[in-house]
Image: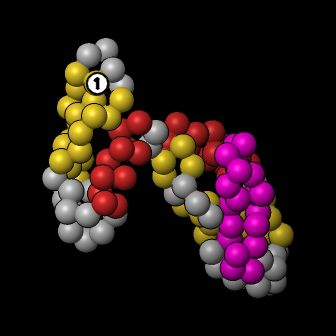
């Protein structure tokens, strides 16, 4: 594999530091440009195993709204996002739904639950 340099803009805080990550044979050897330790951690994760929080909507039957906004309670591996969306798109829920209700306890085998982010009342 050899040496490789990746550049990112840190999204952990509003500073938006320009990060440079040096990799050697797929392993991080140096991170520069960060003004705090969180930026370094972000750069390492983004370079080796990127993760994302998934946000979407789910269809609701019998509710005052036809869709309920949802999100994963934590981040999941980026490569699992499309598979996770297949699970989300197949899901149908019944009203009522409360904020924080777990709709899928373990999305795509990640150990991360999918939760409702809005109350949906019965129509």
Give the SS element for disc 1: strand
Query: Which of the image's four quarters has the N terminus?
Result: top left
Residue at image position (68%, 67%) is 115
**In which quadrant of the rendered view does residue 34 lie?**
bottom left
Which region is colored magenta?
98-116
- Numbered disc total: 1
Q: Is residue 28 visible?
A: yes
Choose between 62 and 97: the one closer to the eye: 97
Q: Quadrant of the C terminus?
A: bottom right
Residue at the far top in the pictured view: 1
Residue at 77% in and 57% down = 105
Position in image of residue 41 (x %, y %): 37, 52
Res 92 quadrant in image:
bottom right
Residue 82, percent from left and from top: 57, 40
Is the residue 12 above or below the residue 62 in the image?
A: above
Asked whether 90 falls inside the magenta stretch, the response is: no
Question: Does the magenta segment cover residue 114?
Answer: yes
Left or right of 101 on screen, residue 36: left
| 16 horizontally vs 81: left or right | left
Q: Going 74% across and 80% down the picture, which residue do you hit?
A: 98
Q: Is any atom of residue 82 visible in this view? A: no
On the image, the x and y values in percent for residue 103 come to 76, 63
For mark 1, does the 10 Å Cα neighbourhood hold few (<14), some (14 to 19), or many (20 or more) residues?
few
Residue identified by numbered label 1: 24
Say if 93 sits above or below 65 in the image. above
Q: Is residue 106 left or right of residue 12?
A: right
Q: Is residue 13 above or below residue 118?
A: above
């Amino acid at each position: 594999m050899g040496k490789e340099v990746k550049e990112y803009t840190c999204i952990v805080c509003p500073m938006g530091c320009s990060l440079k990550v040096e990799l050697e044979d797929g392993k991080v050897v140096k991170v520069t440009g960060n003004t705090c330790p969180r930026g370094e951690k972000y750069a390492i994760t983004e370079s080796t195993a990127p993760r994302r929080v998934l946000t979407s909507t789910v269809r609701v039957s019998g509710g005052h709204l036809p869709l309920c906004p949802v999100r994963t309670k934590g981040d999941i591996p980026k490569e699992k996002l499309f598979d996770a969306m297949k699970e989300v798109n197949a899901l149908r829920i019944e009203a009522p739904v409360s904020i924080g209700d777990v709709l899928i306890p373990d999305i795509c085998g990640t150990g991360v639950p999918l939760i409702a982010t809005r109350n949906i009342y019965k129509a």
